Image (cartoon, helix red, strand yellow):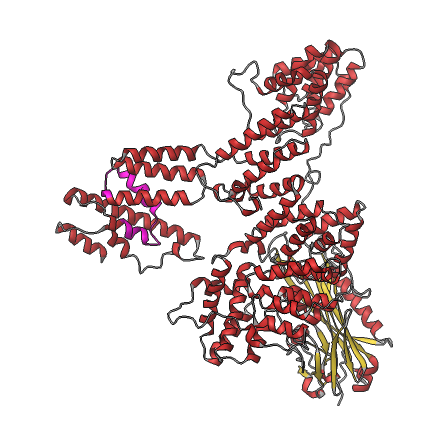
């Protein structure tokens, strides 16, 4: 083995490393090598070998994701090469990725419906499967399997188990919890997105069961694609978007070592100053800003939700409940979009459809979180923090959500009406106990557009803010979580 | 109900099958057969099963006494097929009765089944020795003396195999391979490859305490001896999902990789765990421009690196620092050396420095012989001074190297110079350098004298513990005895592997020639 081949082998080992963030970095690195003519041939050949040997459908799509990454970095892997990779261990998620990466190439779904046939009538679901499936993969897959059983009337879970058994046998994986301890304990530092071989066996079995259901015409291809797309570990659009650095205006604080922690007060002071500055005639206003402020022995998270508020009586809402309401509102869905790509068209709605009565306040939120169809394990912090977009009540007719390399732009009638960016501030593969990751995001709304769609909005613009602090007495165990919510700019004048 | 049935059978002097007792337990959900059952429930279930075993064996004794009916092949096959039945526990109880309770077919089946099981599994050797001894007892009780002999032999093999407190030997061998490689001695890679099966199975035949770090040490050695094997080892660790060890192997790679190479930069761009980023940051701090490129790309995606804070307090913070004021040596002439020692009592960490300062002070006043007298007097009195190296230097200056030699030997022995646990290598090397430069013909004599018994010890007290073999090899290398070093290393590899002979360890494919 040459020195280069040896090094390449270790890079490919990183592709199967269990943590999602390492896999993402490996895909991006290999994509960059593919884009470099010096290494292209050797890497292409190695990827072919890798795709042939991987033995697990859910991982066999990684070369296709690398092709997607290479395309972002300036090199289009020839279709026939990628097609060969995709058919080594074909699956519906492979088909969806191929469709996305090569939208102009025809595709025959039958080539991707690989399964083991109907399971024998006496086939029984094992205790191990029932007990550990949610340990190894997110519960969404079990949820959908149960929905398929209920709605389509087919024994999907049994078929899933049957296919999973076949995958285990083929890949030589023993049914056991194996390296599960590597994940770490939930109340200490632990990996957020981690997929062991067993996880991939569960996911591959799921994909094969979907293929079986389509082959037997018990599930529509469209529905199967919907479910299969969730096995893609990353959203292809969000992947392009490079996180930025923490904005200079974002509050900071230092966690004191002594007994009295004044961090919360420091943060509130800065939020108050920010609110004062927000009154000035800047080009943009905050729709949403969320992120970690500081970390150390204690961790502080700040959320700022921009909204329009009107007081209709003396009773004020519970601000803690109000912030919860912001986070729990239904997600914003796109029209004409791919399941693997965040973004698309959003259609405007009337103000009264979006506003909420909270005690005697009428609240119109300025932002909603957008729906991400994949389970974005490779960029898990984006799934946890969500991605906030302008509320549909700020859209006149319809707007396009475009993901660029450095920001998400929301464009209506050719004019950018809002921008979204997120930042990483030393984010790691692990989080500490129940704390949030060291990331943040901001949605900035363009004032001129606000003036157009909501004349006079500035009179009722306010912030509902929450500081969440995480403390623990010792270096181990879960944090105690405390939060405090405040409003800035809310009016108590009752308008008749 | 089962008890009533059996009581009736016994009263009527009818036969009954021991297996029926165990079969009747099948409807019960035994915790030891349920994944994730609580430990206390499993413990209670084992205790209950022991009680059942006992009752069953008592009943078997009655059957032997009243009907000459022994435990049959069908009985044992049924019992062994039940997942809640614990053969080890049952056999241990049977042998305590010292009665031949099994018929021939049952006995042979049990012995064969258990021996096959032992041959096919890797577990801690003391446990295996115990199991073989149970089989030996079972065979002996039933008059199968030849079988008993072979099991006694197997028990003995396992008893003297790799066990508690011998489990650090492999560490020494791995480090010896590195030392020999550094000296240009042929063979280190071969030694590591021979050790590979034992290291791969180390957590199966030891409890993993300390030995669990052997795979990491192996990575360290491979990085130096054969980087291409490190890559193969890393791949194998990933494949068998030994991720902690694989991560260490990756860190080793990161430390040595040429980060000016684009392919290595591509690999390092995946190095996002804390330790990896620390390694890259260290390399960057040392002026490695490739590391700077990698760190920039990592920072672009992840943000600035913030290592997890180390909350461990230093020993100084914990109040272990010594605050006693320095003692003026001038107040304590050689005749009052004992008083000086009393004045520095408690200054544990600076004890040697204080004594050296005292000796230097009085040597400067022309009293070197009195200083030697004072120091050796206290040593002979049994005081623990840790100043043998100092005495050697003083005696050498005052009386010449021949008279000083034994003090060099004493320094090596009393300061545990052969032990990697107790002394720093640099300290030992200083003495070896003296041997090489001043006593070159006495290199073997020094080894024998310093390893051998003191004059007040038995002549048989010639001991090299497993923690000393590395130093011996390093010494041989230092005094230019490379052939001896190689021969010793080879021998140590063979001896260490003999400790795993009772089990057949699979060879991991990374260690097989491609």
Query: x, y percentage for residue B356?
Result: 74, 21
Q: Residue at x 74, y 68 (%)?
A: A72
Farthest left residue in view: B12
Q: From what the image shows, is residue A99 above or below residue B239?
A: below
The picture places residue A460, in percent across and down from the top left corner, at 78, 82
Label count reads 0
Asked whether residue B167 is in view, the answer is yes
| Picture layout, residue A59 above or below residue B463 | below
- The relative height of residue A200 versus residue A475 in the rendered view (above or below) is below
Hey, which quadrant is residue B475 in on the image? Answer: top right
Left or right, residue B103 beside residue A125: left
Which secondary structure is most common in the magenta stretch? Answer: helix
- Image position of A343 with respect to B354: above or below: below
Question: Within the image, what quadrant is residue B270 found in?
Answer: bottom right
Instruction: Decide if residue B423 is on the left or right side of residue A454.
Output: left
Residue B97 part of the magenta segment: yes
Region of the chain picked out in magenta, as a range: B76-104
Q: Is residue A302 visible?
A: no
């Amino acid at each position: 083995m040459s020195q280069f081949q040896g090094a390449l082998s270790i890079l490919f080992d990183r592709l199967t490393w269990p943590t999602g963030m390492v896999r993402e970095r490996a895909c991006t690195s290999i994509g960059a090598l593919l884009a470099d003519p010096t290494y292209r041939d050797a890497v292409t050949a190695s990827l072919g070998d890798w795709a042939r040997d991987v033995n697990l459908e859910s991982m066999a799509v990684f070369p296709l994701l690398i092709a997607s990454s290479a395309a972002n970095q300036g090199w289009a892997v020839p279709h026939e090469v990628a097609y060969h990779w995709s058919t080594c261990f074909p699956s519906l998620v492979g088909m969806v990725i191929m469709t996305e990466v090569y939208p102009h190439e025809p595709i025959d779904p039958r080539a991707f419906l690989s399964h083991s046939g109907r399971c024998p009538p006496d086939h029984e679901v094992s205790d191990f499967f029932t007990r550990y499936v949610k340990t190894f993969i997110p519960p969404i897959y079990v949820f959908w399997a149960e929905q398929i059983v209920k709605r389509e009337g087919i024994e999907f879970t049994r078929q899933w188990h049957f296919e999973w058994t076949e995958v285990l046998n083929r890949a030589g994986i023993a049914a056991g919890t194996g390296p599960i301890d590597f994940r770490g304990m939930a109340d200490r530092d632990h990996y957020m997105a981690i997929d062991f071989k067993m996880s991939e066996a569960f996911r591959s079995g799921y994909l094969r069961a979907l293929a079986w259901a389509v082959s037997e015409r018990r599930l529509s291809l469209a529905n199967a694609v919907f479910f299969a797309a969730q096995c893609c570990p990353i959203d292809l659009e969000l992947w392009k978007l490079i996180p930025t650095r923490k904005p200079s205006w974002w509050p900071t604080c230092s966690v004191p070592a002594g007994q009295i922690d004044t961090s919360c007060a420091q943060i509130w002071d800065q939020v108050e100053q920010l609110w004062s500055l927000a009154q000035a005639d800047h080009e943009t206003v905050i729709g949403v800003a969320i992120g970690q402020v500081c970390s150390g022995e204690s961790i502080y998270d700040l959320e700022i939700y921009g909204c329009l508020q009107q007081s209709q009586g003396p009773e004020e809402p519970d601000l803690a409940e109000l912030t919860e309401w912001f986070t729990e509102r239904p997600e914003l869905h796109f029209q004409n979009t791919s399941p693997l790509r965040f973004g698309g068209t959003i259609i405007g709605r009337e103000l009264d459809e979006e506003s909420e009565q909270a005690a005697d306040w009428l609240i119109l939120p300025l932002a909603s979180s957008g729906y991400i169809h994949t389970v974005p394990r490779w960029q898990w912090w984006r799934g946890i923090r969500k991605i906030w977009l302008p509320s549909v009540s700020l859209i006149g007719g319809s707007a396009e959500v475009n993901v660029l390399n450095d920001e998400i732009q929301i464009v209506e009638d050719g004019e950018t009406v809002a921008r979204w960016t997120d930042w990483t501030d030393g984010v790691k593969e692990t989080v500490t106990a129940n704390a949030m990751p060291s990331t943040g995001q901001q949605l900035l709304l363009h004032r001129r557009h606000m003036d157009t769609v909501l004349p006079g909005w500035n009179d009722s613009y306010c912030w509902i803010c929450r500081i969440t602090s995480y403390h623990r007495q010792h270096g181990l165990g879960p944090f105690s979580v405390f939060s405090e919510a405040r409003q800035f700019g809310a009016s108590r004048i009752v308008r008749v | 109900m089962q008890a009533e049935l059996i009581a009736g059978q016994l009263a009527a002097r009818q036969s009954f099958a021991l297996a029926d007792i165990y079969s009747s337990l099948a409807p019960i959900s035994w915790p030891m057969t349920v994944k994730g059952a609580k430990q206390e429930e499993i413990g209670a279930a084992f205790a209950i099963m022991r009680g059942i075993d006992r009752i069953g064996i008592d009943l078997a004794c009655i059957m032997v006494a009243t009907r000459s009916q022994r435990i049959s092949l069908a009985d044992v096959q049924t019992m062994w097929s039940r997942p809640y039945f614990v053969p080890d526990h049952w056999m241990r109880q049977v042998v305590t009765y010292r009665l031949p309770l099994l018929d021939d077919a049952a006995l042979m089946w049990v012995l064969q089944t258990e021996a096959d099981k032992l041959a096919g599994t890797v577990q801690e050797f003391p446990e295996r020795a115990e199991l073989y001894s149970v089989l030996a007892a079972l065979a002996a009780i039933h008059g199968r003396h030849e079988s008993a002999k072979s099991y006694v032999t197997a028990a003995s093999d396992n008893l003297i195999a790799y066990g508690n407190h011998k489990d650090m030997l492999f560490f020494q061998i791995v480090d010896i391979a590195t030392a020999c490689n550094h000296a240009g001695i042929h063979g280190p890679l071969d030694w590591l490859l021979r050790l590979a099966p034992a290291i791969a199975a180390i957590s199966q035949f030891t409890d993993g305490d300390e030995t669990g770090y052997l795979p990491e040490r192996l990575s360290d050695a491979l990085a130096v001896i054969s980087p291409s094997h490190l890559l193969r080892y890393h791949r194998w660790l990933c494949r068998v999902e030994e991720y902690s060890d694989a991560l260490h192997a990756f860190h080793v790679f990161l430390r040595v990789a040429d980060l000016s190479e684009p392919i290595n930069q591509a690999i390092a761009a995946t190095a996002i765990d804390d330790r990896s980023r620390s390694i890259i940051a260290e390399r960057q701090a040392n002026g490695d421009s490739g590391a700077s490129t990698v760190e920039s790309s990592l920072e672009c995606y992840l943000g600035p690196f913030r290592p997890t804070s180390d909350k461990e307090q230093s020993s100084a913070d914990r109040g272990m620092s010594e605050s006693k004021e320095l003692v003026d040596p001038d107040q304590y002439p050689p005749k009052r050396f004992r008083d000086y020692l009393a004045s520095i009592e408690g200054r544990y960490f600076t004890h040697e420095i204080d004594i050296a300062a005292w000796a230097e002070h009085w040597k400067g006043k022309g009293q070197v012989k009195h200083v030697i007298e004072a120091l050796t007097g206290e040593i002979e009195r049994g005081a623990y001074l840790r100043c043998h190296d100092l005495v050697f230097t003083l005696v050498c200056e005052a009386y010449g190297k021949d008279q000083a030699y034994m003090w060099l030997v004493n320094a090596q022995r009393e300061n545990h110079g052969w032990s990697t646990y107790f002394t720093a290598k640099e300290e030992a090397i200083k003495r070896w350098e003296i041997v090489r430069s001043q006593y070159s013909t006495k290199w073997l004599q020094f080894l024998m004298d310093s390893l051998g018994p003191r004059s007040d010890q038995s002549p048989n007290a010639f001991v090299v513990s497993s923690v000393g073999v590395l130093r011996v090899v390093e010494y041989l290398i230092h005094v230019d005895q490379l052939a001896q070093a190689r021969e010793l290393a080879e021998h140590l590899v063979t001896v260490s592997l003999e400790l795993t002979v009772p089990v057949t360890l699979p060879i991991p494919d990374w260690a097989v020639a491609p």
